Image (tube, grey):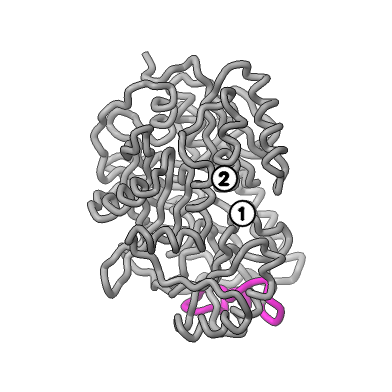
Amino acid sequence: MSLLDIRVPAVLLRIDRNPFHHGTLGAVRSLGRAGVEVHVVADSSGSPVSRSRFVRQLHPPPAPGASPAEIAAVLHRVAARIARPAVLIPMDDASAIAAGRLRADLAPDFLLPQQPGTLPERVADKAELAEVCAAAGIPHPPTLVPDSAEETAAAVRRLGLPVIAKWSRPWLLPAGAGLRSTVVVRSAQEAVELYLRSEEAGSRLLLQEFLAPGPDRDWFFHGYADRTGRVRAGGPGRKQQAWPRAAGLTAVGLWTPNPQVRALAERLTGELGFRGIFDLDFRRCGSTGRYHLLDFNPRPGAQFRLFADSAGLDVVRAQHLDLTHRPLPDGVPLAGRAFVVENYAPLSALRPAPRGRELAWSAPDDRGPGLAMWALWGRHVAGRLLGRLHDGTAVPAPRPHTPVVRQAGEPLVPAPQPGEPLVPAARDEELTGVAGVPAAPGVPGLSGQPDRSDDEKASSC
């Protein structure tokens, strides 16, 4: 008998277009295996997610850039088809922000955590997160938000080079503009040129002190804050391997006890009154040892299934149980358990995992998505290689490990490394940044860069 109330369906909402988002598949499987009817409102028709036997129905998503009213209309149409209340689980920042704003309008068709409607937007905003951390006493890299080109140049001098440049609301970046959510800049002029595109970007530019990557420095915490504010499910994890190296998404993660990271997560969510699923990204400072919060994602991280405990509880099951007033089981953390995204870390998927491992795509009880992923991935990689050959651009040969700065869940594409997946690398002129980090794309006079391809948009570290 399922612990979950299988009379209540779940609706997964994802506005961002990304066929290779394995977090959506993880939520489909977690709830479907528990007997819950799962509906997916996302652009999944060409995605391996659509091949899962646990998907009850796919529904067309809101258009990118849809207004809150348009998003509400889509969800109300889905609710009319389901014809009973459902637990709504946003799977990307834009969806989480919309769900927060629309909570009153979506009731009683959808069950959502009760919290201030603007809170998801507040924590997802990079500039506001800096203020939140300062007020709560949570370590955060020194951050400045300039109001003019002159202030931008002064901020660079104050923070020192290199400096991290972020758009405060990356979900507003227009498609086709060549703007990335986070880049490293190497001069005041580069920062100023980015600042001058603020209106086009749709949000403020902020400049942040560079925190160097290194071994054992990238951590994350996934959790669910229940109706009382208690953090349930989830736990702290360490990024063992990233794609690209030291940047972007977690290719291999390990459930690793860390009382400091847990204490920071519980303190911050408690002071904010946050309710629901969250994913926090930290970087440990090599000189002070302090854990700095880099991102607060008010939704499941892509690798949330790493934290399935001995009772089978993870953050999406926790939300379903809590919102349907079912008790949450007290499972035992499975320290040492691994999570592997096999298209980014194929060799790690083949190595022994004595403490348990879950693969992002392949599963013996749901083979369709894994088979579809490899077929789509092969065509995807082949297409990019052929495109390069057609353009007359050679794919650079593998080079020694080059550290790069974490890109707030948005990986860059350096040259493949031995044992890593065959993904066409960025052009050499896109790799002319500090310590191997690409220079700011889309800035006049700097290296141009095309829009992120689908495999470069996987959310969360």
Q: Magenta segment, which residues?
A: 428-446
Quadrant where the image shows the C terminus:
bottom left
- Which quadrant, please, contains the N terminus? top left
Label 1 element class: helix
Pointer 1 local density, CA inside 10 Å: few below 14, some 14–19, many at least 20? many
Which residue does the image show at 72% across and 64% down from the upper left? 177
In x, y percent, where is residue 79? 64, 23
Residue beneath label 1, please? 171
- Of label 1 and label 2, which has the lower sequence position? 2
Give the farthest residue toward the right: 390
Res 49 visible: yes
Q: Quadrant of residue 381?
A: bottom right
The amino acid at mark 2 is: Ile
* Element on which disc 2 rests: helix
Query: Where is residue 66 drawn, in percent x and y?
Result: 71, 44
Residue carrying label 2: 97
Answer whether residue 445 is magenta in the image: yes
* Residue name at image x 50 percent, y 79 percent: 434
Vertical position of residue 51 compared to residue 202: above or below: above
For residue 395, the mark is none
| Residue 419 seen anywhere in this rendered image of the structure | no
Does 121 sit left or right of 445 as displayed?
left
